[in-house]
Amino acid sequence: MPKGYAHAALQLLLGASSLAIAGQAIAQSAAEPSAPGLDEIVVTAQKRAQNLQDVPIAISAIGAEKIEQLGIKDSRDLSGLAPNVVITQGTVSNSAAVFSMRGISNGGSESFGVDAANGLYVDGVYIARGGAMGLSVMDVERVEVLRGPQGTLFGRNTTGGAIHFISRAPSSTFRLKAEAGYGNFNAWNGKIVVDPGAIAGISTSFAYSHSERDGLVDNILQPSDSKDPGARKSDAIRAAARIDLGGTGSIQYMFDWSRISGTPLPFILTNVSNGAARPPVIVNGQPVVQTQQAPVAQYLAGATFANPACAALAAPSRTYRHEVCNNVLSHALDKSWGHNLQVQNDFDAFKVKSTTGYRFWNSDTLTDLDGIGAFSGPAFSNATLFNGMPASLLQFIPSIPAAARPFIAAAAVPSITQDLFDIDNHRRHKQFSQEIEISGDTNTLDWVVGGFYFWEKGSEDGFQNSGFILDTNSIFLANFGPLGPAFAAANPARYRMVQTRARLAYSTSAESTAVYGQFTFYPGGRDSGLRLTAGGRYTWDAKRMLRVQNGAAPLAVPEAGDAKFSKFTWNLMAGYDVADGINLYARAATGYRSGGFNSQDPAITGTNQLGSFKPEKVTSYEIGLKSELFDRRLRFNVAAYHNIYDDLAVLGPVTNAPVGTFATRIINAGKVVYNGVEVETQAILSDNFSLDGSIGYIDIKYKEFLAGQSPTPGAPPVNIASVVTPGFTSPLTANAALNAQFPLNWGSATLRGRIGYTHEDGKYNFSSSIGSPFNEQIKGDAIDLVDVQIGIDGIPLGNAAGEVKLWVKNLTNAKDFVRSIDYGQLGFAGGYYAEPRTYGVTIGAKF
């Protein structure tokens, strides 16, 4: 971990605070008028509009101006902008994302049998599937990042936290904004947003955006730059209509649609196995089975590549590559669309709000997952095992007639042309949700009660095509007694490949129902400075899975699973205003992540029933300080937390998957303790300069991790907590940005600039080297990114205001290894690198 960067970020944050304090002291001593302070940030994290500084939970809020300045287009662009929040790209889909908040991640699985551990909401509607969590968003008013379990008001599957995108409501007056941009990799984009103004009392808003770019890495087997890895094209539409009801209520309907097509970033081969035996390892005095790997290194060494230029790219290396060989021309297409209806009214004594959501997501992917092209080499089959063996040895095989021995001895070992791994996957998903909130307030009490219903249905039809390498000498040595060494010595092709085709086809459905309530009491009235909150939620979940194939052939009898889960989660909070602008708070809360099904697990022995894993539970304790000092020129918030997880749901490779296939599964590992601290600050340094930043650190201690497989059949799982590594988690995250603005002598034109730095510690992607042999070698790099934006807005254009902006992402062109896959028994591993430096110009106008 690059501690120098951590210290630099912390010093920058503290230094900014010192500058703000010193600057304010000078201003006060000189009796000069105070400059305007930081803007108040209003959030709705507690189901009502509140000042962020008054809410006793850790929240980061990103407003529309910053969203626009940073070019945030989807949830993945939020990574590192809030402490202890890391978002990792998907592997095969254009809209997939892996969220990690306070050390709790979604695990990288996109199976419909597994729920996310961190909730994503768009205008109050829960996005259920991790494969759709990178959805495009536009015309956003703000993003709220809620850290820590949100089990009372946001419900299940928020054990790590929740992210809420909140769209801008239609304007009752005419509004038009248009922009266009161009950048490297032949990237260009355009967007237009228009609010015609209220017509017959109905305010509407319409938005359309388009973006596209060429690939970032050259696939030498693909002549078109627009189809190279990293190429993408997206279109998005949003429409909204709102009507006010008598000044006390409103009805608002929103429709969104997006289509993202392109070629996923390339998988880079970094490690291959030599097939060496991996005997059981001793953990805490007990033997634990390790994943055995195929001898890929030896096979590739003797293979002939279909395209000779691919041979050099087949050498495994952890280095960024400008060229790859994808013989399978990867492509991904994701479509999502949805309806959102919100009805609310203020009845004076109480308010009622209804939010109805209906969403769809379709995903089709064809992906090359080795990046080295097709190659030819010896093929394995039982019928040709003895081809090329001397007739003097074949005479000892009773099943081979004497007349056939010369022909078999003269026969060549057949060959096969294949790649290591590719997939073809098709997913379909739809969901419906309905939430009713009833709230009210008095001088001493805020309250909200509600009910929630959610339904979803999804299906996955996926095909794996892998080349599994066999050491055929092991067959002779294990089965031919004293003749084994002689057959092994005469073997004309020791390493042979089996083409393994497998299909996973299943459908799922789920229902969830909940009731909740939360009450905040103000002893002595709202001005007393003391706030006490209590809340609770009861959730009922029912899940079903029907599987028709899990391997090479369809199942004779479909396999099915039904499971029900329920849980009460609660929340206790206290806040106290120590002084004007200084608020202390304490919080204890619980969270619950629903159980589910592992789509690739075998059925329960002797049945066609699918087993389920249990829910994940968390109890969290948090204390914090929120402060605004020196005429609100400095905002300084800090939080510390202690989280205890039981039955933590973790992702790992299947150690007993069918030979030649790769599978992952969720297990309930046991007890884990998370301790962390977070700091966020904003400071106005002068009329022209301001600074914002954050830093977060988390320490994870595994107390129990029952994932070890004993070599003794039927023995209970072994606790391997002492060797576990947390997946998709950066122990240290930090970001800092210096902002500048200079009014120009040109109407209301203003020159604005920002330089930002983001750090994320390197991340493991799997839980141990026992199940993932290359776990240590493929740990991600520490990410250190510098982004820059500079532009002029408010340029006089008659009745409009123009703007122009230059931007650079990844200024230093860092080549960071950010996500990895260990294919376990298949015998190889690799991963993905972050996008290279991108830059461009954007011009626009507002009317």
Image: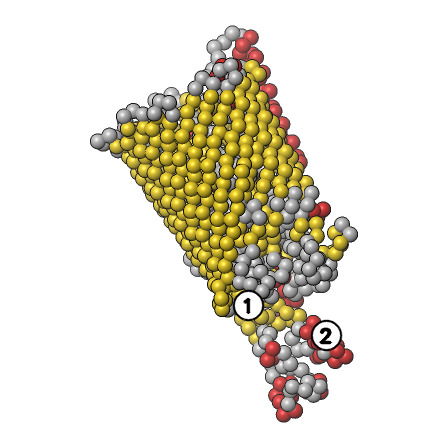
Which colour assignment does the render follow?
Answer: secondary structure
Q: Indicate which disc, 1 or 2, sits on the residue closer to the N terminus.
A: 2
Give above or below for 292 relative to 487: above
Q: Which residue is pictured at 49% across the width and 29% down the height?
A: 518
Front in this rendered view, residue 744 or 549: 549
Q: Which quarter of the rendering shows the C terminus?
A: top left
Front in this rendered view, residue 785 or 294: 294
- Image position, residue 257 (x, y; %): 35, 45
Q: Which residue is pictured at 66% across the width and 78% down the height?
A: 492
- Are circles 1 and 2 on residues that touch, CB within 8 Å? no
Give above or below for 81 relative to 553: above
Q: Label 2: how many residues lie within 10 Å, few (<14), some (14-19) or many (20+)? A: some
Q: Is residue 335 visible?
A: yes
Question: Looking at the image, which residue sits at the far left?
Answer: 200
Q: Which quarter of the rendering shows the N terminus?
A: top right
- Image position, residue 164 (x, y; %): 46, 36
| Residue at image mark 2 | 477
Q: Is residue 423 left or right of residue 624?
A: left
Q: Which residue is pictured at 48% across the width and 56% down the height?
A: 545
Q: Label 1: how many residues lie within 10 Å, few (<14), some (14-19) or many (20+)? A: some
Q: CA distance from mark 1 to mark 2?
A: 24 Å
Q: Amino acid at mark 2?
A: Leu
Question: Looking at the image, which residue sits at the far bottom?
Answer: 403
Q: Amino acid at mark 1?
A: Thr
Front in this rendered view, residue 400 or 194: 400
Under circle 2, the secondary element is helix
Q: Is residue 582 left or right of residue 342?
A: right
Q: Which residue is pictured at 35% across the width and 22% down the height?
A: 348
Front in this rendered view, residue 527 or 180: 527
Residue 500 numbered tag: 1
- Image position, residue 595 (x, y; %): 54, 48
